[in-house]
Image (cartoon, rainbow, N blue to C red):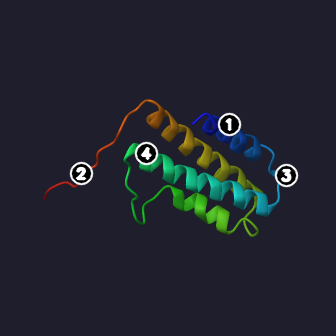
Amino acid sequence: MSSTPNFIAELVRAANETERLTAVEVTRMLDRAIATVRELREQAGIPPVVGRDALIYVQTVSAGSDRVPREEWHHGLLHAAEMIRDLHIVVDSGTRIDITARRP
């Protein structure tokens, strides 16, 4: 799990240097971030939320990196870093989240 903080730093650095990146590099980083978020969520016991997932924005920037402004690259990379950071803290603390459906 020690590589997670390194990846967070890599995302933040990339967000602050978007002028040095290509659309392909942004897509690769964001796709890797999406996979990392999903893995960390699974480790924490957080189920996917269909249609209301905060990852939708990151996926949108990744899929359209060749068409969106670099400012969106910046926001997408930072958003991904924040999500990974927060989930890493939860998983590293040993916390498990148990979500149950509410009864009407």
Label 3 vs label 2: CA separation? 44 Å
Categorize mark 1 by other alpha carbons within 10 Å: few (<14), some (14-19), many (20+): few
- Mark 1 — residue? 6
Q: Nearer the viewer, residue 18 or 24?
A: 24
Q: Secondary structure at mark 4?
A: helix
Label disc, if present, on residue 100 of the rendered structure: 2
Residue located 40% across and 32% down the image: 94
Identify the residue at the far top of this view: 93
First of labels 3, 2 by sequence position: 3
Q: Nearer the viewer, residue 95 or 86?
A: 95
Q: Position of residue 73 (x, y in %)?
A: 71, 55
Q: Position of residue 68 (x, y in %)?
A: 72, 65
First of labels 4, 3 by sequence position: 3
Q: Which of the 4 image quarters holds residue 8? A: top right
Label 2 vs label 4: CA separation? 17 Å
- Mark 4 — residue? 43
Label 1 vs label 4: CA separation? 19 Å
Looking at the rendered structure, the kind of residue marked 3 is: Glu
Q: Secondary structure at mark 3?
A: helix
Residue located 42% across and 66% down the image: 51
- Mark 3 — residue? 19
